[in-house]
C-alpha cells in the first residue's frame, strides 16, 4: 500500500481562460490530519473536487492509496468519503432514511447500515432529529448528517470542504471529536478551512494554496515558524487589509 493516502501530480484545472488550479503537487501521508488552506478563490474547492472524482482535471493525476482516482474511480471511491461544499442532500428523506439510502447505494448489508446509522446519529447528537426531514435541518445539522453519510462505509480517507463553516461551537466540537477519533484509528482526513485556529489545533500538516498554486506545505510547526498560523498565513498570501490604502474614506462620515 502507498505511504501516501493522497498524491496529486501537476494537477491543473482551467475554466475557459481562467486557471483555477495551476499545477498542484500534494502528498498527504496516510494517517495524517491534513489542512488545505488559502484565501477565497485560491482553488481549494476545485482541488478537492478533482481529488474526489467530482471534477475532471485539465491535466495531472490523483492517486488515493495507490489507486488512480480518474483511471480507476470505483476502487478509489470505495475507500473515500467526502463532504463537499454546498452538499446537496435528499431533502425529502429523514436523516435516518438518508443514511439507509446511502448505505444501500454503497452496497452495504442493511443490518450493518442500521446499526452504524444509529451510532453515528447518537454520536453526532442527531438522534432526536433522526426522523425529521433533512429539509428542516439547520446548517450545522446538515454538515453533521453529511459527515455521517461520508463515514458510514468506514472509508480510509475522508475529504471535507469547509466542514466548520456556519457551524456553532457545540456542533463544531462534536464534529472535531468524531474526526479526532477517526484519525486516531489510522484514517486520513484532508479538509479545507479558513479558520486558522482550528487548522492549527487539528492538523499535523498543511498546504497553503494561493492563486491555484501551493505556496507552502509541510508540518504545521514548520509553516508557522514560531508565529501563529494566522500570522504565517497572512505573510504567505501577502494580502493587505481592505481600506488601508485610503479607500472607503466616505465610510462612517456623517454630516449635518
Ligand atoms: N465552475 C467554474 N467556472 C468558472 N470559474 C470557476 C468555477 N469554479 C471555480 N472557478 C474559479 O476558480 C477559482 C478557484 O475557485 P475555488 O472555488 O476552487 O476557490 P476556493 O479556494 O475554494 O475559494 P473559497 O475559499 O472562496 O471557497 C476562482 O477564481 C473561481 O472563480
Image (cartoon, rainbow, N blue to C red):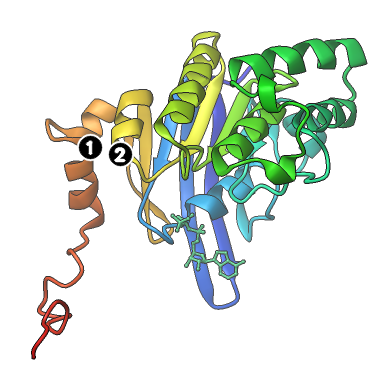
Seen from the viewer's position, the closer of residues 187 and 125 is 125
Q: Quadrant of residue 241?
A: bottom left
Residue 35, position as x, y percentages in the image: 41, 35
Q: Residues within 10 Å of mark 2 (few under 14, many from 20)?
A: some
Asked if the residues shown at circle 2 and circle 1 are in contact, with their CB atoms under 8 angstroms apart, the answer is yes
* Left or right position of 160 against 119: left
Residue 181, position as x, y percentages in the image: 51, 12
Q: Secondary structure at mark 2?
A: helix
Q: Is mark 1 within 8 Å of ligand 1?
A: no
Residue 208 bears which disc, if any?
none
Q: Residue at x 42, y 41 (%)?
A: 36
Q: Is residue 31 visible?
A: no
Q: Residue at x 11, y 84 (%)?
A: 254
Residue 196 bears which disc, if any?
2
Quadrant containing the C terminus in the rendered view:
bottom left
Which residue is labeled 1 in the image?
Answer: 229
Earlier-in-chain disc, 2 versus 1 = 2
Seen from the viewer's position, the closer of residues 100 and 187 is 100
Q: Residues within 10 Å of mark 1 (few under 14, many from 20)?
A: many
Q: Secondary structure at mark 1?
A: helix
In the displayed structure, would residue 97 be above or below residue 57? above
* Left or right position of 209 against 73: left
Seen from the viewer's position, the closer of residues 180 and 207 is 180
In the displayed structure, would residue 194 be above or below residue 156? below
Quadrant containing the N terminus in the rendered view:
top right
Residue 232, position as x, y percentages in the image: 19, 43
* Left or right position of 11 against 108: left
Q: Is residue 102 visible?
A: yes
* Left or right position of 98 against 58: right
Amino acid at each position: 500500500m502507498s505511504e501516501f493516502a493522497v498524491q496529486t501530480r501537476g494537477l491543473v484545472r482551467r475554466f475557459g481562460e481562467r486557471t483555477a488550479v495551476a499545477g498542484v503537487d500534494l502528498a498527504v501521508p496516510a494517517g495524517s490530519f491534513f489542512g488545505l488552506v488559502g484565501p477565497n478563490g485560491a482553488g481549494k474547492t476545485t482541488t478537492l473536487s478533482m481529488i474526489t472524482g467530482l471534477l475532471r482535471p485539465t491535466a495531472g493525476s490523483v492517486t488515493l492509496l495507490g489507486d488512480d482516482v480518474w483511471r480507476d474511480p470505483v476502487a478509489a471511491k470505495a475507500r473515500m468519503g467526502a463532504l463537499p461544499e454546498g452538499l446537496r442532500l435528499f431533502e425529502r428523506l429523514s436523516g435516518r432514511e438518508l443514511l439507509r439510502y446511502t448505505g444501500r447505494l454503497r452496497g452495504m448489508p442493511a443490518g450493518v447500515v442500521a446499526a452504524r446509522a444509529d451510532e453515528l446519529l447518537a454520536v453526532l447528537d442527531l438522534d432526536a432529529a433522526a426522523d425529521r426531514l433533512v429539509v428542516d435541518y439547520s446548517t450545522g445539522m446538515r454538515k453533521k448528517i453529511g459527515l455521517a453519510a461520508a463515514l458510514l462505509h468506514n472509508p480510509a480517507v475522508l475529504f471535507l470542504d469547509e466542514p466548520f463553516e456556519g457551524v456553532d461551537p457545540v456542533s463544531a466540537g462534536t464534529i472535531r471529536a468524531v474526526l479526532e477519533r477517526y484519525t486516531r484509528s489510522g484514517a486520513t482526513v484532508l479538509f479545507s478551512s479558513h479558520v486558522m485556529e482550528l487548522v492549527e489545533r487539528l492538523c499535523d500538516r498543511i498546504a497553503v494554496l494561493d492563486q491555484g498554486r501551493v505556496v507552502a506545505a509541510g508540518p504545521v510547526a514548520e509553516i508557522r515558524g514560531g508565529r501563529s498560523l494566522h500570522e504565517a498565513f497572512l505573510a504567505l498570501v501577502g494580502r493587505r487589509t481592505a481600506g488601508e490604502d485610503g479607500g472607503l474614506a466616505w465610510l462612517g462620515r456623517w454630516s449635518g
